[in-house]
Image (cartoon, grey):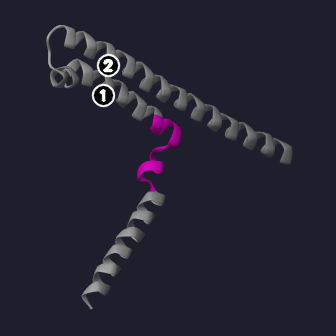
Amino acid sequence: MEKFTEAHRYQRIKDKVDNLRAFYIHFIGYFIFNTTITTIKIIDDLDEGKTLQEALFDFGTIALWLIWGVGIAFHAFSVYGFDYFLGKNWESKKLQECMEVEERFLNQKV
């Protein structure tokens, strides 16, 4: 029974590492691809007579980052889990942090 448990534990950890690797590859691809496309788009817009500000803040430039960014966020939630971002651990750390800030504030008044 112990070997089955150890093998099962190893497989869960291996799956988690594989998911992390896939997420990192996805994020690196997101960054490289969007940077390349954005650079090409900005150069084309500047050649057409647009200003740098118009080229940077064009909807097409921003939309690519945002739409794929939503996909990246969902992938991150699937890998790290929702608890990583706003779970009990985060909540307890935030509560402790807020209590420390309030305690420092009250000690300064006295």
Q: Is residue 81 magenta?
A: yes
Which residue is depicted at the point 75% across and 40% down? 10
Q: Is residue 66 above or below residue 109?
A: above
Which type of secondary structure does the marked residue at label 1 adopt? Answer: helix
Residue extending furthest bottom?
110
In percent of width and height, residue 2 lies at 84, 48
Disc number lying in front (1 or 2):
2
Q: Is residue 84 left or right of residue 11?
A: left
Can residue 98 be seen here? The reply is yes
Q: Amino acid at mark 2?
A: Thr
Q: Amino acid at mark 1?
A: Leu
In percent of width and height, residue 9 lies at 73, 43
Which residue is depicted at the point 15% across and 19% down? 51
Which label belongs to residue 66?
1
Quarter of the image where the C terminus is located: bottom left
Residue numbers of the magenta segment = 76-87
Which type of secondary structure does the marked residue at label 2 adopt? Answer: helix
In percent of width and height, residue 102 lies at 31, 77
Which label belongs to residue 38?
2
Which residue is depicted at the point 36% across and 29% down? 69
